[in-house]
Image: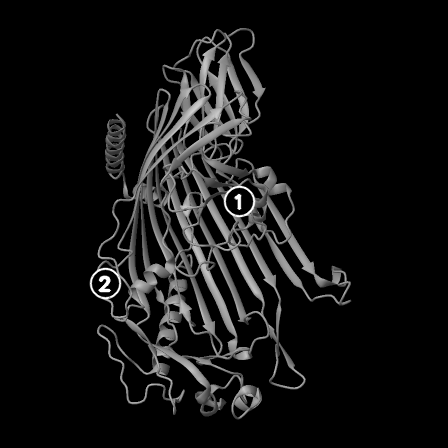
């Protein structure tokens, strides 16, 4: 019986997908200008459903079919539908906002109710129409339910009032996540409600565009957004329905602000300085600090009730001084200061267009740039460890939602997201690790690891009696290109500090000038080296990741207070793993990918008292998450074919200047080059790729 039900669901999904294809082909017959508009602004997907559903009855409890239902935002956008023969209506794919819902039918008075719809919530609105009399319209203020009673998902919302009213030191909107159930951590960062991001544990969506950076280390490169650019967000921590995937712990859905019929805007400045700080009671000193955050928003209507715009900008300038004390190099220790000014820029622009009652078109662009010119690792660190970071994130999104009928709504979605960061060492040198400190540039710098998504998605919503059905498909193309060199300048481990050598030396004698590797005493260091590794070969990544997702979800209102959530999802990442990759370093490579990633989901939500305030939830399912970035980097790069991490044999007479005497490293499919030449070449390639990407993607070019 279950197999037949699943088969029926899949057949219905294929039928709807076919209908969507016919609709797209029909649309492509229009003029080139209209086609370009559709491709640019293609339709909004809802990875977490936001909607309004309900029923229409008369005062005697009899259902009313054919009632006109109109939902209008305070900004002016409208959505139209009619109740079916069972008196049920639904707006399954709408923007989270404040709405006025008007319900009317010939022979009955019109009822208007005000409510707030939050991201990811479906508000239940049951309307009783009185017989038409002296009063033709009745307005009732309705307070939104505190809890979504139609889903087994465990989630929480930061609503617009909270976003706008609670002050935050540093303006990091993610700090508000600590107000939500399921967030058990206070160490919120600018990038993650969990403190430290780990791929596969979290997925971030802005207006349902995935903006999770997965191409580098676990806490690297997440885009940031201005608090004033976002209207609200929701975090789901458990029981994801079938429309959501690729996360094992948390899904965060953010919604940007939109324009309204009336012109509105804001300006802000948030300035902090140590002149306002009190002295530390123990040290009797004030730590230097300065930070300036500034920006604003502006929105309105190009054409009332049809075309709206919104834009926001935020900049930050935080002068910092990085101090390091060179213990052991001078007596007394010398303290050096580096100017390290953090600069960020966050911008967002959005257009909403409603050409006719049944169509809603949406487009958005965002950008985030950051840079810090002079960083040092934490603690007392050698000046030779100095490095800089810089990067850019930007994304486009287009969405088109069409009400095909009163019971069928389709959403078509397309987007691109780009993220890139460059880690650049100030000094080109090998890394030498002593027991008490490290000298030289980081072993894995410079690096250039971009992320690019091309995302396409289609969602179909079908109201069939007490069944709210959702079918969808998603495709993400992620070409992973970058440079991840490791140890190409060499990395040595020394077994003792200079003062403990057989012939003791001072740090200054070994490193007369920390910023000039040609002055370092390699001859004195070499007899004390316990391990040495150097990388050779091609460290450039070239992987085509093709992520696909298919799903079917049925939210079945079995009884007035009981909803069953039944779903089936399929996820796959084709081409991510190089199946059957030949390796010579012992790394086990899979012979084929796993293509059986079916994830059934089942759950329920029971409104115990019928008030929408006490709900029992339960469920189970199978979930799939993104692989860690290094899983596919290592498979392609560090396999002994494209590159090799050569370990020198440490013996009497070992020299850091000639760690592989009389040897030539040979590898198939790899070009071996001189260490310094290879390093310079890869650095130039990585920087050229980065700046080329910037030049290609500056608006107007």
Q: Position of residue 17 (x, y in %)?
A: 26, 35
Is there any visible trace of residue 301 in the rendered image? yes
Choose mark 1 or mark 2, whichever is in front: 2
Using the image, determine if residue 483 lies above or below residue 551.
Answer: below
**Does residue 288 sit above or below 12 in this rendering?**
below
Coloration of the structure image: one colour
Q: Secondary structure at mark 2?
A: loop
In what quadrant of the picture does the C terminus appear?
Answer: bottom left
Kindly report the distance in space between the C-alpha atoms of the residues bearing marks 1 and 2.
44 Å
36 w.r.t. 152: above or below: below
Q: Nearer the viewer, residue 255 or 674?
A: 674
Q: Residues within 10 Å of mark 2 (few under 14, many from 20)?
A: some
Q: Residues within 10 Å of mark 1 (few under 14, many from 20)?
A: many
Task: Describe residue 254's horizontal placement relative to residue 588 as left or right.
Answer: right
Left-right relation of 155 to 620: right
Circles 1, 2 touching at the beta carbon (< 8 Å): no
Measured from the top left, where is residue 505 in percent x and y?
55, 91
Q: Nearer the viewer, residue 77 or 396?
A: 396
The residue carrying mark 1 is 230
Identify whether 464 is placed above or below 25: above
Residue 460 shows in this picture: no
Give me the disc on residue 75: none
Q: Residue at x 40, y 26 (%)?
A: 564
Nearer-the-camera pick, 444 or 19: 444
What element does badge 1 sit on?
strand
Q: Of callouts 1 and 2, which one flags the residue occurring earlier in the amino acid sequence?
A: 1
Q: Position of residue 683 (x, y in %)?
A: 39, 74
Percent x, y of residue 175: 58, 48
Residue at 64% x, 61% y is 291
Q: Which residue, given by chain and number where applicable, does mark 2 sit on? A: 581
Q: In the displayed structure, does residue 318 sit left or right of residue 353?
A: right
Looking at the figure, which quarter contains the N terminus?
Answer: top left
């Amino acid at each position: 019986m279950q197999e037949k039900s699943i088969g029926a669901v899949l057949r219905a999904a294929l039928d709807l997908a076919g209908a969507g294809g016919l609709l797209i082909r029909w649309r492509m017959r229009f003029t080139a200008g209209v086609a370009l508009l559709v491709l640019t602004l293609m339709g909004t997907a809802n990875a977490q459903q936001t909607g309004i559903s309900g029923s229409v009855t008369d005062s005697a409890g009899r259902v009313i079919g054919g009632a006109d239902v109109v939902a209008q935002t305070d900004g002016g956008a409208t959505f139209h539908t009619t109740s079916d023969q069972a008196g049920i209506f639904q707006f399954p794919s709408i923007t989270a906002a404040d709405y006025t819902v008007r319900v009317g039918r010939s022979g009955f008075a019109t009822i208007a109710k005000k409510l707030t719809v939050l991201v990811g919530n479906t508000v239940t609105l049951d309307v009783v129409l009185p017989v038409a009399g002296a009063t033709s319209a009745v307005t009732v203020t309705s307070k939104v339910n505190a809890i979504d009673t139609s889903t087994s998902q465990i989630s929480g919302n930061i609503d617009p009032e909270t976003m706008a009213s609670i002050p935050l030191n540093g303006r990091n909107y993610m700090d508000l996540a600590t107000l939500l159930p399921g967030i058990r951590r206070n160490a919120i960062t600018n990038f993650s409600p969990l403190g430290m991001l780990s791929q596969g544990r979290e997925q971030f969506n802005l207006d349902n565009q995935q903006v999770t950076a997965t191409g580098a280390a676990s806490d690297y490169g997440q885009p940031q957004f201005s608090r004033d650019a976002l209207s609200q967000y929701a975090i789901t921590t458990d029981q994801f329905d079938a429309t959501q995937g690729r996360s094992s712990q948390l899904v965060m859905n953010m919604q940007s602000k939109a324009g309204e019929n009336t012109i509105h805007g804001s300006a802000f400045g948030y300035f902090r300085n140590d002149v306002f700080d009190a002295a530390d009671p123990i040290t009797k000193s004030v730590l230097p600090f300065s930070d300036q955050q500034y920006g604003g928003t502006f929105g309105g209507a190009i054409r009332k009730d049809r075309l709206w715009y919104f834009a926001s900008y935020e900049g930050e300038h935080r002068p910092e001084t990085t101090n390091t004390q060179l213990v052991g190099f001078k007596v007394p220790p010398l303290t050096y200061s580096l100017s390290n000014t953090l600069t960020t820029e966050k911008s967002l622009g959005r257009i909403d267009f409603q050409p006719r009652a049944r169509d809603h078109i949406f487009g958005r662009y965002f950008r985030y740039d950051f840079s810090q010119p002079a960083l040092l690792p934490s603690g007392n660190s050698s000046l030779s460890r100095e490095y800089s970071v810089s990067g850019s994130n930007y994304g486009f999104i287009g969405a088109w939602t069409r009400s095909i009928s009163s019971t069928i709504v389709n959403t078509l979605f397309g987007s691109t997201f780009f993220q890139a960061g460059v880690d650049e060492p100030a000094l080109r040198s090998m890394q030498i690790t002593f027991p008490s400190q490290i000298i030289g540039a980081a072993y894995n710098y410079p690096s250039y690891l971009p992320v690019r998504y091309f995302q396409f998605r289609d969602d179909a919503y079908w109201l069939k009696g007490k069944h709210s059905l959702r079918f969808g498909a998603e495709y993400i193309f992620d070409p992973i290109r970058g440079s991840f060199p490791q140890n190409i300048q060499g990395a040595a481990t020394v077994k003792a500090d200079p003062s403990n050598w057989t012939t003791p030396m001072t740090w200054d004698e070994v490193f007369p000038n920390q910023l000039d590797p040609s002055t370092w005493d390699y001859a004195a260091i070499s007899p004390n080296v316990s391990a040495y590794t150097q990388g050779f070969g091609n460290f450039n990544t070239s992987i085509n990741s093709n992520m696909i997702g298919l799903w079917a979800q049925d939210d079945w209102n079995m009884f007035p207070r009981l909803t069953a959530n039944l779903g089936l999802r399929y996820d796959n990442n084709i081409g991510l793993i190089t199946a059957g990759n030949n390796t010579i370093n012992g790394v086990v490579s899979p012979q084929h990918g796993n293509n059986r990633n079916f994830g059934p989901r089942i759950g329920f939500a029971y409104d115990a008292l019928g008030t929408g305030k006490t709900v029992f939830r339960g469920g189970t399912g199978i979930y799939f998450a993104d692989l860690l970035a290094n899983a596919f980097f290592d498979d392609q790069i560090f396999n002994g074919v494209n590159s090799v991490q050569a370990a020198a044999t440490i013996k009497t007479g070992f020299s850091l200047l000639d760690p592989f005497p009389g040897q030539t490293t040979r590898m198939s499919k790899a070009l071996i080059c001189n260490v310094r030449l290879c390093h310079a070449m890869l650095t130039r390639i990585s920087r050229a790729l980065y700046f080329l990407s910037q030049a290609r993607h500056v608006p107007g070019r």
